[in-house]
Image (cartoon, helix red, strand yellow):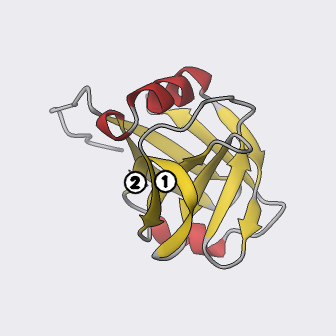
Amino acid sequence: MSSANSSRSISRIPITVELVNKGNIDCEMIRHLAPVTVSKILKGLPIQDRIHRFKDQFIYIQTGLEIGAEKPKTKFKLGDVGFMTSNGAVCFFLKDSTVSAMSHVGILKEGIELIGSARPGDVIVMRSMP
């Protein structure tokens, strides 16, 4: 079904973020943004957890990964994916936000509107694309 780009990059790694029983979101992990963090997240796939919400800024899932801060930043845009070192969480931004420093690790590509429909208690599964 997916006629993925034949030009796969070693810097941009496609993964699937499944919002269980709601649909899939195409995501791209971007290695040059935070190489160590992205590598550890990719090695930890699949990652599955229930969604938590932080105000109206982002939803996040716990990963169990302990990774230090890498190229931290505080401004994120709708669709950005960050890694919060304080609790080992992957964060999916619902709108442009200024937050506590975290590592920028990727972006949501297609299906971003699904993230907005996520509710606390829903489950997200992050997995490698076949």
Amino acid type at mark 1: Val
Q: Position of residue 25 (x, y in %)?
A: 49, 55
Can you tell which quarter of the image residue 56 is in? bottom right
Packing grade of label 1 (10 A; few <14, some 14-19, many >=20) is many
Q: Nearer the viewer, residue 2 or 110?
A: 110
- Which mark, by number, is residue 81? 1
Q: Residue at x 40, y 54 (%)?
A: 107
Q: Nearer the viewer, residue 80 or 114?
A: 80
Amino acid type at mark 2: Ile
The reply to whether dot 1 and dot 2 touch (C-beta < 8 Å) is: yes
Can you tell which quarter of the image residue 127 is in? top right
Name the outermost residue toward the top. 43
Q: Dividing the image into 4 quarters, which one contains the C terminus?
A: top left
In this view, 52 is above or below 2: below
Q: Which residue is mark 2?
A: 107
Q: Position of residue 72 (x, y in %)?
A: 47, 48
Q: Residue at x 26, y 26 (%)?
A: 10
Relative to residue 125, is residue 32 drawn left or right?
Answer: left
Can you tell which quarter of the image residue 13 is in? top left
| Earlier-in-chain disc, 1 versus 2 | 1
- Which mark, by number, is residue 40? none
Q: Dividing the image into 4 quarters, which one contains the N terminus?
A: top left
Q: Residue at x 41, y 69 (%)?
A: 77
Q: Position of residue 103 (x, y in %)?
A: 49, 46
- Secondary structure of residue under mark 1: strand
Q: Position of residue 12 (x, y in %)?
A: 29, 37
Q: Residue at x 54, y 55 (%)?
A: 101
In this view, 96 is above or below 36: below
